[in-house]
Amino acid sequence: MQTPHSVDVSAGIPGAPWFRPGAAEDDSRKLGMSPAFPPVYFTVKGSRAFTLVELIVVLVVLSVTVMFILPQFSHIAPTGSVQKSARQLSAFFAEASTVAQEQSRSLRVHYTPSTRTFTLEPTAGADWEADRDPGEVTLPQLTLNQTVTVRDVQLYTGGTLSTGTFSIQIDRHGYLQPAVIHLQEDSGSELTLQLEPFLGAARVLQGYVSMSEELFH
C-alpha cells in the first residue's frame, strides 16, 4: 500500500536507468564491502577532452605569437654579453679601489675606445716608479667583449663624454670619482654602471640611467 507521498522503487526509478533495486548491495558484495556503505556512482555529462588537432593548433598559435613579440623587447632586455661585461667592469673597479688603498697611491682608470680597454694606471704626475719596483705591483686591465662598447660616460662634475678617451680618478683611500658609465651592445641592449664613490664599487642598473644627484645620495 502506498501513501500519497510514497514512491514504489521496487521496479526502479523512471528516467534513471542507472538505479536498480538491490544494485548497491550486489556491487558491495562483489567488492567485499559492507552493504551498509554502498559505493556512490557519479556521471558527468557533456564533458570531453581536447583532441590532438586542437592541441597542435594552440601550440602553433602560441609559437607564432612569441615570434612576433620577442623582437619587440630585444632592445630592452640585455643579453648575456653586455651583462657579463657589466659584471666584469664592476669587479674591475672594486679591484682598482683595493689596489689604491693597499698602495696608498692615487690612481686612475683610463678607457681607450679603439681597443675597448680599461687600464688602471698611476695618476698623471704621481711619482709611482720612484717608490715602487715596477714588478712589485701588477695593475689590472679589462677589455670589453667585442660586441660591447661604452656609449658615453657622465661625470658628476665634468658633463657627458661620448667620444674619445676618458679617465676615472681614484684617490689614495680608494674613493671613486662619481660617474655613470653606459654600456651598449651592438644589438642595442644597454646597461648603466653607477660608480659608488665611498664604497669603492660599482652598481649595475638596467637600461640607460642618466646622471642625477639622487644616485649619489
Image: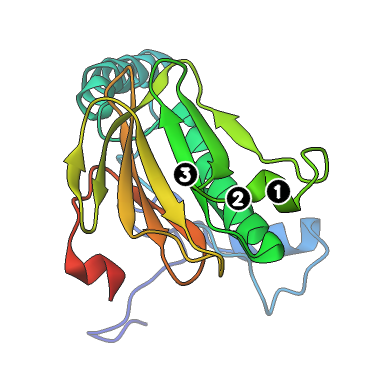
In the rendered image, which residue does mark 3 sit on?
Answer: 124
Eyeballing the image, is 12 above or below 67? below
Circle 1/circle 2 CB separation < 8 Å: yes
Q: Distance between the residues labelled 1 and 2?
A: 6 Å
Mark 2, residues whose alpha carbon is within 10 Å: few (<14), some, or many (≥20)?
Answer: few
- What residue do we see at 40% from left, 57% from top? 195
Observer able to see residue 43: no
Position of 182 with respect to 38 (left or right) is: left
Q: Is residue 191 left or right of residue 99?
A: left
Does 20 sit above or below residue 139? below
The residue labelled by disc 2 is 127
Please give left or right for residue 187 compared with residue 84 in the image: left
Residue 120: x %, y % from top left: 56, 41
Q: Percent x, y for residue 173? A: 56, 70
Q: Which of marks 1 and 3 is nearer the N terminus?
A: 3
Amino acid of disc 2:
Asp
* Residue visible at 69% across and 44% down in the picture: 129
Please give the label number shown on residue 130.
1
The amino acid pointed to by label 1 is: Ala
